[in-house]
Image: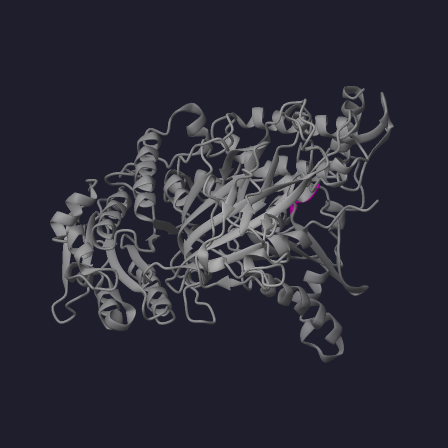
Amino acid sequence: MAAVDWSATEESEGVRFSWNVVPSSRIDATRLVIPFGCMFTPLKRLEGMPVLPYEPVACKQCQGILNPYCNVDFMGKIWVCNFCHCRNHFPAHYRDISENNLPAELFPNYNTVEYTLPVPVQDPVVLFVLDTCVSEEDLQGARDALQQVLSTMPENTLVGLITYGSMTHVHELGFPDFPKQYVFRGDAEFTKEQVAELLGARTQNVQQAGAHGQSPNRARFLLPISECEFAMSSALDEVPTNGFERPTGSREGRATGGALSVAAGLLASTVPGAPARIINLVGGPTTVGPGTIVGMDLAEALRSHQDFEKGNARHFKKALKFYQSLGQQLVGTGVALDVMACALDQVGLAEMRPAIEATGGTMVLAESFHAPIFKQSLTRLLATTPEGHLASAFNATVEVKLVKEIKACGAIGPVSALNKGGSMVAENEIGMGGTTAWRACALREDTSLAFFLEVTAPANTQSAAGQTFFVQFITHYVHACGQTRMRVATVARRWAERGDKASGPGTDVAAGFDQEAATALMARYAAWRCESEEMFDVLRWIDRMLIRVCAKFGHYTKDDPASFRLDPSFAIYPQFMFHLRRSQFLQVFNNSPDETAFFRLMLNREGVLNSLLMIQPTLLAYSFDGPPTPVVLDVSSVSPDNILLLDTYFHVVVHYGRTIAQWRDAGYADQPEHVNFSNLLRAPREDAEALLGDRFPLPKLVECDQYGSQARFLLAKLNPSATHHAPVGAGDVIFTDDVSLETFMVHLQKVAVQSGG
């Protein structure tokens, strides 16, 4: 029996569960080993999804929303909630409904609908915070990128500018003929009240202006692009590099934390609650004020993972506490924080991550403000839709509604918990738990959240077995056009039949296992555990879980490894776990803390397919033998006469075999009689450019030759089936002590058949 392609379900529902058939009792569900949960994309573009110009009908008891799975009494104009089973009367304007006259939310094929809510339209706000402690050439790259992106953004977008070095400068854009700047100390943290007082921008003035009004204070610092494009361009052109002379042997005085606290205070006092984001363009580590990660003296090295392990990162805890506090402040006002780190050094992303992730923001890693990764990623972050709106949603809350037999353990993703308790909250917490609602200050169409659920029904429960259960996701958000909308997605899954063998190999439970979604959930869970546990302990936990899964769902004769096999629905799962163990999400060797923070943040926001790409990259081979073909992610795929295209999500690598590289360097591709060779060289490059096309952030493109130094980007991802420990053969070898996939599987089968039975 072939494995089910669950990606088709995701295209229609926007959600993928690890288990699509679930035992109806807590004990049986616990024996599944792999957590019961789902990957949900709140704003996934769904073909044919209706947008309804009215408010939803909610259950008076649990606030669940009317959906196609509810039982409806058309004669009595009553509907029964499919979560709490409360009977509800339809509102008066539904009096004409019947089996032949259904509202859109009751259409059987509309399990996801969107409602337009009667809330005043709000224009988006983007506040740029620019680091000037860089060279004049680098600063000019930032100016050019900002001016370019301003020319493509919707004209109704409110924009503002803050620049900083060792001091913070708030630019007043409302008087272009007489430009002014308010200067704040860089070594101090400012509350929103202090910022409001120093800028003369009180919150109550904004409230008195009304939703559509323009307060005088807001208009001084935040203006629509249509009104301030010239003022912004002039301010950017006149921004100097940090004016303080740097002593020999010292770093630049960079007050990133102080500048961000001023930015947060400015938005809280001028546009409280508006859909807003702060975009921080930073060119080096913070050395002054709150959020400092390293001292001014160049003799003090930037912290590493080894420093974290030994407790030698003396600035880390204080900086982390500051950004956690800043994140909560930004969440309270609905502001997302994005950081574009454009430096060869670390800038402090490991410390900033709590504030970025809690607000739904993102990170970009680039080498300078001139780098294409920075410029194109900034353009994509602020890209516009065909309708002329920013391609992002703001001020989102995601709430989950569950049947009484299931409770929510928590969520892992770019959100923060709203501490909404109740009977649907599980005692066991995973990620951000203790709630059924989470907030994301910014959401993209491809942002995915991982929800972990728990079956809590006692073992003697019989009524649910074999029946359908429901999960509902309610997402409130401010659409890019300024409208407030509510998207309601209701999905149905099935309880397993009762019986001792209900969840063994070959059963409906096993057939309903989505190994790809389970891998994405396990990856987030493991990365989350790495934040508070030793990596060795997390790896052992993954191994134990995998052994238990194989022992429970494998077909084998006890103590006979050769007899072991897995159903198609589980067949690739061990391979995914092998690559997860070797991935940059768990292995921090050769990565800086900033890089690890970036990798884990991106894992926590991407969907199932991109998560799998990060864990187990794809590899294509190009040769004269035929069209491009997928090949195994193994060192045996490296050949002198082929070209390999590796996509790791973060890097796109074009690897030329030794013979191909020699022919290329000899200029054969330029000779008319070798047009086939020219086409062979061009094909992987064109495919690589296509992969870069719409991905955010922009991946790094690496072109390398076999045995060249850059070939490490490819070799690090390949299965080391041939190493320097093995006898010398004809192919390439990888110098590593890591075990190969084959060795891993042999040991897994051996311990699985011993554990079972």
Tag count: 0
Residue 29 falls in which quadrant of the image? top right
Label the magenta part by its dominant secondary structure. Answer: loop
Quadrant the C terminus occupies: top right
Quadrant the N terminus occupies: top right
**Residue at 26 percent of width and 42 percent of height:** 250
* Residue at the farthest front position: 75
Magenta region: 715-719
Is residue 45 visible in the rendered structure shown here? no
Q: Is residue 726 toward the left or the right of residue 556 in the image?
A: left
Above or below, 736 against 128 in this view is: above
Above or below, 440 against 34 in this view is: below
> Residue 161: horizontal and vertical position, in percent?
25, 59
Residue 230 falls in which quadrant of the image? bottom left
Q: Is residue 515 magenta?
A: no
Q: Is residue 752 toward the left or the right of residue 579 in the image?
A: right
Q: Is residue 120 toward the left or the right of residue 536 in the image?
A: left
**Residue at 71 percent of width and 62 percent of height:** 660
Q: Which of 666/542 is in front?
A: 542
Q: Which of 20/326 is in front?
A: 20
* Residue at the farthest bottom position: 672
Is residue 89 visible in the rendered structure shown here? yes
Residue 169 falls in which quadrant of the image? bottom left
> Residue 589: horizontal and vertical position, in percent?
53, 35
Q: Which of 561/708 is in front?
A: 561
Above or below, 308 against 573 in this view is: above
> Residue 545: horizontal and vertical position, in percent?
66, 27
